[in-house]
Image (cartoon, helix red, strand yellow):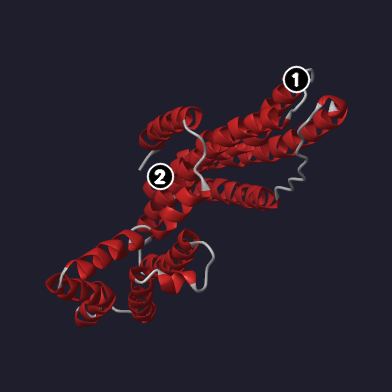
């Protein structure tokens, strides 16, 4: 994986997110609830329809219900037979029990209504619990695989995760951020009951605040792309000149990101204070980039380490 492949993908994703954000409102709570309950609510609804349709449909629904619930246990038995099972695979027993429970209450939604005021919320909570166990299981599986992998494979996994994080940041900036900006402007407009009050200054400051808040995120995407490139260089040659060069660029870019994050927060807050009398909407933040500072220090140490190791390697080659 290289930045030449990741960067165009992120660019296309940013464009698509921007178009969707400008053309559609941000998802409602009900849409998010449906996302968390998918596909369990849909499958449970289908089983309910089959069960109520006819006696034969009821038998088929029960068989499907049992098969879905037992699927994780069958996977556990298969992994045990192949001698691939680890302690983390015990979570499959919990997944199976949760599947039986979640599917049962979703097939009988009256049981959800006894504990939750909103049916959609109840389904989302149940789906979220099941997803949390599934995600935890796959993360533990991944940790075991990484622990048993060679350095080159670990760096490959690192590149993949960095690319996924960059994609999440693109979604956050160009979809959630832009949609949130549009919603904020619309909310200010709806809340203004006096037509004689101009919203121009408020809207301009909202847009400026948005850009100042998103600049660090955009720089973080660039930081992740550089990290992917560095991981690729490490896979080829640990102490090569390209690795030392990229490590230095990454450390410098990290310092720039930290500085811009601090300055952007200060500028955003000061602008809002200066023009506070003209604003109908404000949002002050105190952003302390501790994680970025720690990352910067680690990168600077690694840069020096790579540089010293590269020089030592060249000296050893000259001696030989």
In the visual, does 274 lie left or right of 43? right
Q: Residue at x 52, y 68 (%)?
A: 116
Q: From what the image shows, is residue 140 above or below residue 34?
A: below
What is the residue that sits farthest to the left in this orientation? 56
Residue 205: give x, y in percent of width and height. Answer: 73, 26
Q: Which mark is residue 114?
A: none
Q: Pointer 1: residues within 10 angstroms few (<14), some, or many (20+)?
A: few
Q: Contact (CB < 8 A) between labels 1 and 2?
A: no
Answer whether residue 245 is visible to the viewer in this image: no
Residue on which the image places disc 1? 195
In the visual, does 37 lie left or right of 204? left
Q: Quadrant for residue 252, please give it.
A: top right
Q: Residue at x 54, y 48 (%)?
A: 306
Q: Quadrant for residue 213, please give it.
A: top right
In the visual, does 37 lie left or right of 63? right
- Pick whichever, 213 or 243, lies toward us: 213
Answer whether residue 185 is visible to the viewer in this image: yes
1 or 2: tag closer to the N-terminus: 1
Q: Which mark is residue 232?
A: 2
Q: Residue at x 37, y 68 (%)?
A: 106
Residue 185: give x, y in percent of width and height. Answer: 65, 29
Q: Quadrant of the N terminus?
A: top left
Give the SS element for disc 1. Answer: loop
Query: CA separation, marks 1 and 2?
Result: 58 Å
Residue 138: give x, y in percent of width and height. Answer: 38, 66
């Amino acid at each position: 994986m290289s930045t030449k492949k990741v960067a165009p993908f992120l660019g296309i994703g940013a464009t698509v997110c921007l178009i969707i954000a400008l053309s559609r409102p941000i998802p409602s709570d009900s849409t998010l609830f449906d996302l968390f309950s998918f596909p369990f609510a849909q499958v449970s609804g289908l089983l309910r329809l089959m069960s109520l349709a006819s006696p034969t449909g009821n038998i088929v629904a029960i068989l499907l219900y049992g098969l879905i619930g037992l699927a994780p246990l069958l996977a556990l038995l298969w992994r045990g037979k192949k001698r691939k099972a680890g302690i983390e695979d015990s979570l499959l027993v919990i997944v199976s029990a949760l599947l039986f429970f979640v599917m049962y209450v979703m097939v009988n939604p009256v049981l959800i209504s006894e504990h939750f005021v909103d049916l959609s919320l109840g389904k989302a909570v149940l789906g979220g619990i099941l997803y949390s166990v599934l995600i935890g299981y796959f993360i533990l599986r991944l940790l075991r695989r990484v622990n048993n992998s060679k350095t080159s494979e670990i760096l490959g996994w690192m590149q993949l995760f960095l690319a996924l994080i960059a994609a999440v940041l693109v979604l956050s900036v160009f979809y959630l951020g832009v949609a949130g900006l549009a919603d904020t402007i619309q909310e200010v407009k709806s809340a203004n009951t006096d037509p004689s009050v101009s919203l121009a200054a408020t809207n301009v400051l909202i847009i400026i605040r948005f850009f100042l808040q998103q600049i660090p995120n955009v720089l973080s995407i660039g930081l992740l792309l550089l990290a992917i490139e560095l991981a690729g260089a490490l896979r080829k040659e640990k102490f090569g000149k390209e690795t030392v060069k990229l490590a230095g660029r990454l450390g410098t870019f990290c310092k720039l990101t930290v500085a811009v994050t601090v300055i952007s927060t200060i500028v955003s807050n000061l602008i809002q204070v200066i023009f506070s009398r003209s604003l109908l909407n404000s949002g002050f933040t105190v952003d302390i980039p501790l994680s970025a500072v720690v990352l910067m220090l680690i990168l600077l140490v690694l840069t020096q380490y790579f540089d010293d190791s590269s020089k030592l390697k060249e000296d050893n080659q000259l001696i030989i």
